[in-house]
Amino acid sequence: MSSATQEVQRQLPIADPAQYRPGRTITQWSPEDPAFWRSTGKKVATRNLWIAVPALLVAFVVWQVWSITATNLKDVGFGFTQSQLFWLTAVPGITGGTARIFYTFLGPMIGQRRFTAISTVVLVVPLLWLGFAVQNTDTSYGTMVAIAALCGIGGANFSSSLANIGFFYPKQEKGNATGINGGLGNLGVSVVQLLTPILITSSVLAIGAGQKKANGSEIYLQNAAFVWVPVVIVLALVAWFGQNDLKVASTPFSQQKIIFKRKHNWLMTWLYVGTFGSFIGFAAALPLLIKTTFPAYSVATYAWMGPALGALARWAGGWIADKLGGARVTILSFVGMAASIIGVTSCRPAPTRAPSRASSSVSCRRSSSRASATARRSARSRSSSGAGT
């Protein structure tokens, strides 16, 4: 916002101080004005931020619920291949990433409060569908893919949430605010991967019949979806009645589309593929990868750790970016990622290789030589015995 605009807004009387109350539309907003920020702006922005955080966290839960659900489908009788199961964890990422393009522009057009509430409550649809689908092993793979695609819209909430919260804060605090929102929101990945293995074993929470595993134990896969439905509804209501719409941030698409012509937008897009794309891609595939490749290890014990560290690092990264600058932090992030990849690949245990044909031949010749020597010794022993007789 320009200094001239700020000056004009300072000269305008505040016609309706009640506009800053929860659930109202704010028509005058000057976060770069220190006096306004101290007296009114900071309190309003903080309230909107801490309502956005749990809403985004649950959106990530819905987005990544398939990362754990897919690991249990074969156990209860679904006849999907390993490739099909990995696709069920990947489809939400595809639809979520694509839907983010549209969600980014819808927030300013519809209003921060309205869009947060609407984009949260619609997550009830894939949750209910998933809860019923996993109770019937005759559910087709195509149906499961459709449900996974709808769960992906939970990931789209990320772009609208961060854009909405960014409007409330002055430039010098945007990094910290979006870091808190994005970082704690990202914890939804760890939450769903940590809690789902516990929830699906609870008959108390179950709505519907359980599913039998090969070992005779019973689980309730529908709990992974149904338990979040009331949470989603409550958070949508809290957003509707507790947040604010910023009239000054309302922008039609015709004015927003200029971003497609800016080269830095495309540069940041490619950088984001490397950072967040790696985070969510690895997080989605890791539980199934652990189960199929390292069956001796517990998915519930290890899968959530990486996403949790990533989410907390994001929170810290926003604060650091305000101090050092976003470009420097981005470079440091890529250096850290490269070092991590080198560390992981260098610390892998060496694969156990079968003996080569040459070594097998040598081994066979040695065995034959030992057998021949034994036979000769036995023959000499018999000859000696015969001579003595």
Image: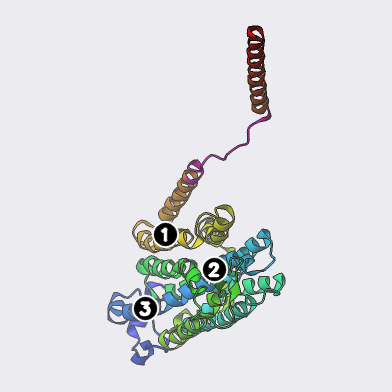
The front one of 128 and 186 is 128
Other residues around mark 2 within 10 Å, as few (<14) / some (14–19) / many (≥20): many
Question: Which is in the foreground here, disc 2 or disc 3?
Answer: 2
Of residue 303 and residue 366, the one placed in the foreground of this image is 366
Q: Label 1: few (<14), some or many (≥20) within 10 Å? A: few
Q: Which residues are magenta?
A: 344-357
Q: Amino acid at mark 2?
A: Gln
User: Could you tell me which quadrant the C terminus lies in?
Assistant: top right
Pointers 1 and 3 in contact (CB under 8 A)? no
Judge by depth and name the residue closer to the eye, 111 or 181.
181
| Residue drawn at 56 percent across, 65 percent down | 67
Dot 1 or dot 3: first in sequence order is 3
The image quarter containing residue 358 is: top right
Give the Cα distance between marks 2 and 3. 28 Å
Give the labeled residue for mark 2. 64
Work out whether residue 157 can be spotted: no
Residue 179 visible? The answer is yes
Our reading of the magenta stretch's main secondary structure is loop
Q: Estimate the spatial distance between the alpha carbons at disc 1 and disc 3, rounded to whole Å.
A: 26 Å
The amino acid on which the numbered mark 1 sits, given as a three-letter code, is Leu
Q: Point out residue 95 in the picture as x, y percentages from the top left corner.
A: 62, 69
From the top left corner, tell me how far across and down residue 348 is, in percent.
Answer: 51, 43
Residue that label 3 marks: 45
Numbered disc 3: secondary structure: helix
Judging by the rendered image, the residue that carries numbered circle 1 is 309
Please tell me whether residue 346 belongs to the stretch shown in magenta: yes
